[in-house]
Image: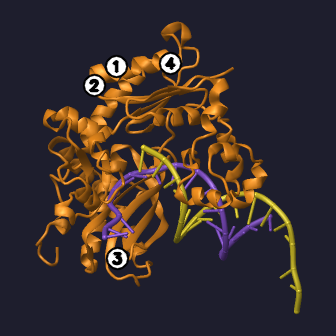
Chain colours: A orange, B purple, C yellow
DNA sequence: TCTGGGGTCCTAGGACCC
DNA sequence: TCTGGGGTCCTAGGACCC
């Protein structure tokens, strides 16, 4: 039976939330991202309003370039906690129409509304209602695509942004996709698009005409999947998000760092942040990955398994330090460090004989961290800091 | 000219086991 | 001295997405 899938995608989400929360920003170019620091800031644009896009600003553009392109813009640091709140409000609108809802990111979701004809008047009617509710109740604009499957719905929602509303009937799918550029295919980024262009392919229709084996030399196992997408065939179900597989934090220094002590301190802070998020989500990590990027922008990762799963910053930090010793240091100063917890397991899972695997002192350390978590929940992140992270601390910390 | 931070998935090569 | 074919797990890097 034919399905009806909606893809709902908020327009310029972070910037739109800022404009809604601050009437003075409405109608003005708004750029959410790194601090531009008068054009010398490090980092990129996370999101920008359509007024800023008119000046050539795009997400992922270096913030210094955004500054040059649009010096009159309102430059804002992201308020992720706020966006998460508004996101919840958006999702509570979406789940009025179906429980077959799959969040794709903070501001995007798939809905399977197959069989909604009697209750809501069909997929297009649901899409229109969602756009209305989001605008009237939340003061925000969503683009919606309606199609027989996920891929086509996603392409459709993107096609007429902002305030887009595109419905693709099953019999229209092939003609809808054929003229679109290769980059619209899910999973085809700049590199893959280049390779496909080099063998003379330009549009999704060009790929749809091929046999998978014509592409397997170029793309390996992915060829079959890609050709099917190009033909508008996508039977992946809409399902609630899978459990997280990794959870990490990373930071780019304002200036590249030579001092190993500064790198170690950053690692400790990152390990604590990751561990706090693990505890909040009742997860433990079975492995750790350390990431280092040098001044030349060359990135190196090293990973290891932990002796036993943990949600404690000390444990993540200790392993990260051991990994740091394995990083070849030829690239000079450090630009970025990151710590990622991997092999996540839900607490209680695989820990039946917990006591046997706990190290002496783990219980008391966990109590301490729980107390810190509670203080942070009440007074805000950073209210409690390790002595080792306090600037100008005594040298023996 | 400069390139964030959060993720997922795939690939290739090596270790290891049968 | 020469030497198989799977299969699985692990690591590091890279492409891609938002």
Q: Pick whichever of labels 2 and 1 is earlier in the sequence.
A: 1
Q: Pick whichever of labels 1 and 4 is earlier in the sequence.
A: 4
> Residue tagged by mark 3?
A295
Between disc 1 and disc 4, the foreground one is: 4
Q: Residue at x 44, y 64 (%)?
A: A289
Q: Chain of mark 1?
A: A
The Cα atoms of the two marked residues, 2 and 3, are separated by 43 Å
Q: Nearer the viewer, residue A328 or A351?
A: A328
Q: Position of residue B13 (x, y in %)?
A: 67, 74
Q: Pick whichever of labels 2 and 4 is earlier in the sequence.
A: 4
Q: Are marks 3 and 1 on the same chain?
A: yes
Q: Pick whichever of labels 2 and 3 is earlier in the sequence.
A: 2
The Cα atoms of the two marked residues, 2 and 4, are separated by 21 Å
The Cα atoms of the two marked residues, 3 and 1, are separated by 48 Å
Q: Are marks 2 and 4 on the same chain?
A: yes
Answer above or below: position of C12 versus A55.
below
Q: From the image, which quarter does the C terminus of chain A lie in?
A: bottom left
Q: Residue at x 56, y 60 (%)?
A: A191
> Seen in the image, is A193 located left or right of residue A205?
left
User: Callout 1: helix, strand or loop?
Assistant: helix
Q: Pick whichever of labels 3 and 1 is earlier in the sequence.
A: 1
> Residue tagged by mark 2?
A138
The image quadrant that residue A198 belongs to is bottom right
> Residue tagged by mark 1?
A133
């Amino acid at each position: 039976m034919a399905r009806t899938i909606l893809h709902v995608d908020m327009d310029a989400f972070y910037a739109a939330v800022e404009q809604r929360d601050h009437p003075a920003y409405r109608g003005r170019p708004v750029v959410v991202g790194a601090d531009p620091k008068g054009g010398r800031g490090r980092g990129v644009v996370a999101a920008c309003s359509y007024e800023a896009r008119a000046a050539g600003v795009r997400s992922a553009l270096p913030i210094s370039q955004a500054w040059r392109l649009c010096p009159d813009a309102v430059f804002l640091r992201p308020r992720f906690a706020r966006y998460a709140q508004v996101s919840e409000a958006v999702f509570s609108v979406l789940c009025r129409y179906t429980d077959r809802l799959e969040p794709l990111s903070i501001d995007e979701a798939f809905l399977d509304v197959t069989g909604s004809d009697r209750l809501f008047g069909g997929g297009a009617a649901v899409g229109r209602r969602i756009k209305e509710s989001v605008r009237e109740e939340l003061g925000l604009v969503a683009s919606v695509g309606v199609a027989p499957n996920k891929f086509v719905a996603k392409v459709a929602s993107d096609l007429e942004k902002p305030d887009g509303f595109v419905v693709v009937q099953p019999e229209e799918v092939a003609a809808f996709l054929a003229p679109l550029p290769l980059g619209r295919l899910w999973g085809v980024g700049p590199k893959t698009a280049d390779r496909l262009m080099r063998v003379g392919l330009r549009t999704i229709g060009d790929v749809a005409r091929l046999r998978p084996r014509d592409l397997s030399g170029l793309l390996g196992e992915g060829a079959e999947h890609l050709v099917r997408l190009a033909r508008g065939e996508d039977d992946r179900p809409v399902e609630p998000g899978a459990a997280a597989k990794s959870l990490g934090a990373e930071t780019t220094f304002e200036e590249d760092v030579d001092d190993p002590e500064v790198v170690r301190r950053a690692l400790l802070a990152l390990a604590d942040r990751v561990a706090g998020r693990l505890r909040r989500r009742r997860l433990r990590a079975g492995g750790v990955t350390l990431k280092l990027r040098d001044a030349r922008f060359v990135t190196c990762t090293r990973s290891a398994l932990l002796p036993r799963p943990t949600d404690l910053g000390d444990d993540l930090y200790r392993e990260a330090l051991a990994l740091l010793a394995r990083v070849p240091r030829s690239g000079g100063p450090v630009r970025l460090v990151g710590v990622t917890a991997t092999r996540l397991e839900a607490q209680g899972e695989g820990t039946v004989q917990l006591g046997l695997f706990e190290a002496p002192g783990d219980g008391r350390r966990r109590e301490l961290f729980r107390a810190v978590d509670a203080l942070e929940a009440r007074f805000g992140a950073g209210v409690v800091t390790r002595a080792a992270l306090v600037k100008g601390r005594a040298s023996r910390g």
